[in-house]
Image (tube, helix red, strand yellow):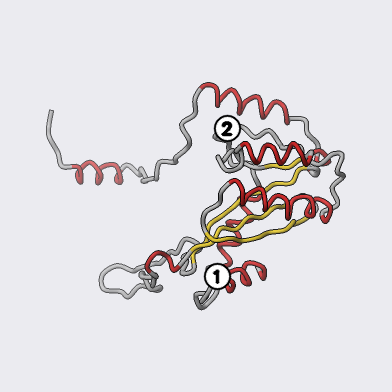
Amino acid sequence: GVHVHERTIDKFLKMEGLKTYVQRKKPKLTQEQIAARYQFAKDHLKWTVEDWSNVMFSDEIIVSLAGPYEKIFYRSGSGNTRPELNPTRNTKQGGGGKMMIWGCMTSNGLGDACWFPEGLDSQLYVEVLQDYVLLSRDYCGIDPEKFTFQQDNAKVHTANIVKEYFRKSKIPVFKWPVNSPDLNPNENLLENVKDHLGQYDTDPESMPEIWERVQDV
């Protein structure tokens, strides 16, 4: 029945040895989506390494001309101690321009990648598929009879024009659950690319220069 300040409560919790954690976020799933995830796990539970080696994983990321490409941390001492790293970072208005990068990978290595100005529509996506998927499949040595292409359920990926391309090209598409868990290894690959882009000493001056760095990475 006693009213106390929240700082008092916070102090008491610290005295009890309780630490503060950031609550993790996760998609809010419907019962149908939960069931679909569960079924996906059951369907692929007994897949072998060979089964997965026939799948090509694909994804896209956006990078900006001025970065930042990765999380920047700095440490600071108590009192008037100077920070060990500069706690500010220069930016450009609007990010200096952005590009979207599409890439693919298999268990046999990387396939092709490409870039285009930010903004991907279904027609452009079909052009990307036409230019890179089958060539990357052959380059990575996947048997055309066993090949499966993976993509997420973004609207651009599931447009009718895209479905028609897959049908005409006879490219089997991996059935990916809606609001899917992050099981695509290509996401880790592209995030790793962004981390390495942040290790350059200077910002790139143009989109082609970013692309050169992506290829180097």
* Residue 73, quarter of picture: bottom left
User: Mark 2: few, some, or many residues within 10 Å (few <14, many ≥20)?
Assistant: some
Of circles 1 and 2, the one toward us is: 1
- Which residue has dot 1 on it? 207
| Residue shown at the point (71%, 41%) measured from the top left | 165
| Residue shown at the point (58%, 36%) measured from the top left | 180
Query: Which x, y percent locates residue 201?
Result: 52, 78
Element under disc 2: loop
Query: Which x, y percent locates residue 42?
Result: 69, 26
Please name whichever residue, 76 or 191, is drawn nearer the observer in this view of the structure.
191
- Which residue has dot 2 on it? 178
Q: Is residue 36 above or below residue 65?
A: above
Query: Which x, y percent locates residue 188?
Result: 61, 52
Q: Which mark is residue 14?
A: none
Residue that lies at the very extreme toward the left in this rendered image: 2
| Residue shown at the point (72%, 37%) measured from the top left | 173
Tag 1 near tag 2, CB within 8 Å: no
Three-letter residue code for mark 2? Val
User: Mark 1: few, some, or many residues within 10 Å (few <14, many ≥20)?
Assistant: some
**Gap in angstroms between the C-alphas marked 1 and 2:** 33 Å
Query: Which x, y percent locates residue 131?
Result: 73, 55
* Residue 115, quarter of picture: bottom right
Left or right of 26, for residue 112: right
Left or right of 170, for residue 4: left
Can you say which quadrant of the picture contains the C terminus? bottom right
Element under disc 1: helix
| Residue shown at the point (81%, 38%) measured from the top left | 51
Q: Earlier in the sequence, mark 1 or mark 2?
A: 2
Can you say which quadrant of the picture contains the N terminus? top left
Three-letter residue code for mark 1? Met
